[in-house]
Image: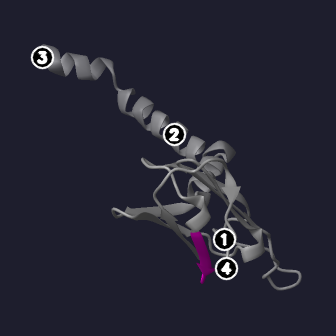
Amino acid sequence: MDRVSNTRQLRPLESLRRLQAWRQMEDWMRGARFRRAARNAAARMRVDVDENEREYVVRADVPGVRKEDLKVRLDGNQVDISAAASEEQVHEPGASAVYSERYMGNQRRILTLAHEIDDAHATAQYRHGMLELHLPKRGSPSGSSVPIR
């Protein structure tokens, strides 16, 4: 017998050890810590930022949030968007959820832009679960809130 065949014969349980490592990984992925991390990633507010020479346009997806539960704060070149989605009961009485992906709770994104924002001329509009901000470029003497229409 050559050496390679001899080595394989001495390690008959090697493939079982590898399988055990995969099973441990699967157990971890089914665990609460992984589910919490996956849920937090899914809950993150998705944002697009466009820029031209006059302004930034920020679009944020915040479905299920009422306009009254949105807050936008500007401070120099930073944009702070926060939203609170309250949990609503949509299941039949006496029924329990089998599968649920919708996030309920607080979300927040802080964006740092290259130019300071003219907060006196900034506008915000919320419709159909999307917040759209028009943020003209210029210096800002101090932080302020932006009313949402």
Tell me the distance, in whole angstroms, between the alpha carbons under discs 1 and 2.
Answer: 23 Å
From the image, give the main secondary structure of the stretch colored magenta. Answer: strand
SS at mark 4 in the image: loop
User: Which residue is labeled 2 in the image?
Assistant: 25
Mark 2 lies on a secondary structure that is helix
Task: Count every numbered label the image shows and give the total.
Answer: 4
Examine the rendered structure and indicate whether residue 116 appears above or below residue 17.
below
| Element at label 3 | loop
35 vs 91: above or below: above
Q: Are marks 4 and 1 in contact (CB under 8 Å)?
A: no
Where is residue 147? Give x, y as percent: 70, 70
Q: Within 10 angstroms of label 3, few (less than 14), some, or many (20 or more) residues?
A: few
Question: Looking at the rendered structure, which numbered label has been put on residue 1?
Answer: 3
User: CA gap, disc 3 to disc 4?
Assistant: 82 Å
Name the residue tied to disc 4: 149
- Identified at 33% across, 21% down, the residue is 11
Query: Which sits earlier in the primary sequence, circle 3 or circle 4?
Result: 3
Residue drawn at 60 percent across, 72 percent down: 124
What segment is highlighted magenta in the picture? 123-129
Residue 44 locus on image (x, y percent): 58, 57
Q: Position of residue 25 (x, y in %)?
A: 51, 40
Instruction: Answer whether residue 132 is magenta in the image.
Output: no
In the picture, measured across the screen, residue 7 lies left or right of residue 18, that is left
